[in-house]
Image: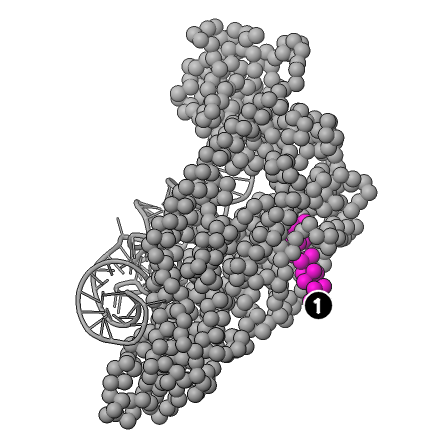
Amino acid sequence: MDTPRRYLVTAALPYANGLKHIGHLAGAYLPADIYVRYLKAQKRDAVFVCGSDEHGTAIPIQAMKEGTTAQAIIDKYHPVIEQNFKDLGIEFDIYHRTSAPLHHETAQEFFTALNKAGELEVKDSEQYYDDEAKTFLADRFIKGTCPNCGYDSAYGDQCEKCGKSLSPDELINPVSTLSGKKPVKKATKHWYLPLDRHEEWLREWIVKGHKDDWRANVVGQCKSWIDGGLQARAVTRDLEWGVKVPLAEAEGKVLYVWFDAPIGYVSATKQWALDNNKDWKPYWYDKDTSLVHFIGKDNIVFHAIIFPVILKLNGNIVPSNVPSNEFMNLEGDKMSTSRGWSIEMDDYINDWIKKDNGGPQFADALRYYLTQIAPETKDSEFTWKGFQDAVNSELVSVFGNFVNRAFVLMHKLCKGKVPKLHETLLDETDRNLVAAIAQSKTTVEKLLEGFSFREAQFEVIDLARKANKYMQEKQPWIVAKRLDTDAEAQQLIDNCLHLCLQLTANLAILINPFLPQTARKMLYMMKVVDKMLDWENAGKTKLLSVGYSLRAPELLFRKVEDAEIAAQLDKLKIKSQQSKVEQAEKKNQEQQAAVVSTPKAEIQYDDFAKMDFRIGTITSAEKVEKADKLLKLEVDLGTEKRTIVSGIALHFQPEDIVGKQVTVVANLAPRKMRGIESQGMILMAEDKAGKLHFINPEGTIDEGSPVS
RNA sequence: GGCGGGAUAGCUCAGGUGGUUAGAGCGUUGGAUUCAUAACCCAAAGGUCUCGGGUUCAACUCCCGAUCCCGCUACCA
């Protein structure tokens, strides 16, 4: 494969509503950073862009809850996240933000270009509107009862209790969070991106074109979407917070965050170009640019289907690869900041890097372990014990120890200088080592080009392992015992240490993309300049000049103590406990607030009289095919039997509820669900634990009895 | 429910257009060694390759079905 003329590498934009954890780091930022550091060592033209994603409805919602402004939230988290990345050695060329005016302009340009070219469709629809606040309500501004789990403060886009994604129409008893009033449906106009027009080239491009060089999960996921038929997606929203839609007729509308966020990669590139006096255009227009998006698996469809469509319509290049990682679990459970089951980058930095006995080596230690367990093909698991093992038995014992013993021996047996190489005395062991050095370079290079970071890093450690073996075989400390009697002894020692030191220099080059701080420290010990880290120097054994005196060794890594691991485990448990308590309190408060501030509007007797409640008996119940939550019930109302489809399958076994009496809303308009017409609705009460209970008469009474 | 990904040694993971004894690192056990951060080096033990069928001379590898984990998605009056 020809080497592209330039690379534009992106890592998913972190949402600026809170701290980011090490799962995010392992999934996108770290592999991207390794890749870019490698490219730059190869002296290739590579730009690494990222930035905060600061729009969307979650941020203003959070602001409202915390009694602050959206701007204050993003201004709080943007710099913290940026600094966290720096502390962990993630070196973006630019860390931009989507609230920047340049981004707003750029996103608007994309919209305008697509709209003018007739690539967007305009559709009218009915959406919830708050009469009092005089505004359309974004999904997140509507609360109601989750139809899935019955949680009564679910948002219009997602229920935070069961995690189910929702649409506002699905909520039972929707309430505007702005005024506390019930919202009304009102006609509105939105712009849509008709993805269905692009199925053909997408299929050709991904399913055929990239089936071998893209990861299986990415191709599979895309194929699944394309085969399922792509739908038009709304590009605009009725919301204040975001990039304004650049049309006079679109007052009060912003670009949907999914549309504006990935364009953040483009605006970030523009800002980088301005800052560095470069031209940004080739990075997004020239076919000879390789665009690579590093993301987590939840982001596949956006980066492999939707954003490429936008790019293509705008005349840009499409990505050459979208290396997506799976997820990283933590000590047996999913990582989740809200549940307190996570390790925030910020926490790690404070607990390890900023400790007196920590320092930058612990940035590399984390990088090392996260790469070692990178979820490249399947979900992986972070354990503190695993972290300790990786650091102690590989970084300390294999890598750090080899470098240290090479330096110590060199100071003891070679006067602190790089010894001469006596070519005539080289044996097969020596030659094998030289070959292994060259081989390592080739292998690591190949693996990195193919996004196999885990294996690439393993190869580097493996070279250190081979180095330890070599030294063991040569045992210069034994040879030293015959220095007085054997004229060749010093020369043998020289050869061994000469090669060990050259190998150390190679280790610095090869480990640099993974553990940049460590490479730095090694450069310092070897008294060489940064330039030595150029990739072209790898594989060579003439990196350190003979006779050059080197510094005293410093330990590259220290061991992680059992007590430190125990402390982290305790901390995690405490944190998740606290979080549980907080969540419970929060829920309580919200429930109380909901009762106080959002009583349902007063109704007249006539309104109530419209309802026809009747007692019925369930005569049969069965699960609805192809639906997890639906039960199909036959209910005897005395004068007639009704078929009612109810979303209670998760709470009751069909056989257990046959014969039960229930209260039925008998005059509710019929509605089809999963092809079955539901002729009514069963009333249910939900207890604190979220369990559903039937509302039924004290004793069995006649079917059809009215309730009033 | 549909779709996608995964299930291989105690742990973390490789693997193959189907073909003799299924690999690595860590961990464990034993040995050797002392230059080195009790590190390194050598050796050994350890696997019905999730389960059940099928194709085949031969399946961990291909096909069908089941189970479990993860993600996307549908159903919710």
Left or right for A379, reference A130: left
At 62% from the left edge and 27% from the top edge, which residue is drawn? A174
Q: Position of residue A543 (x, y in %)?
A: 47, 82
Mark 1: give few (<14), some (14-19) or many (20+) Cα within 10 Å.
few
| Disc 1 chain ID | A
Spot the residue most to the right: A248
Q: Quadrant of residue A503?
A: bottom left
Left or right for A182, reference A673: right
Q: Position of residue A415 (x, y in %)?
A: 37, 85
Magenta stretch encompasses residue A274: yes
At 39% from the left edge and 69% from the top edge, which residue is drawn? A555
- Residue marked by disc 1: A278
Q: Secondary structure at mark 1?
A: loop
Q: Looking at the magenta stretch, what is its main secondary structure?
A: helix
Quadrant assignment for the N terminus of chain A = bottom right
Magenta stretch encompasses residue A254: no
Question: In the figure, A391 relative to A220: above or below?
Answer: below
The magenta segment: A260-276
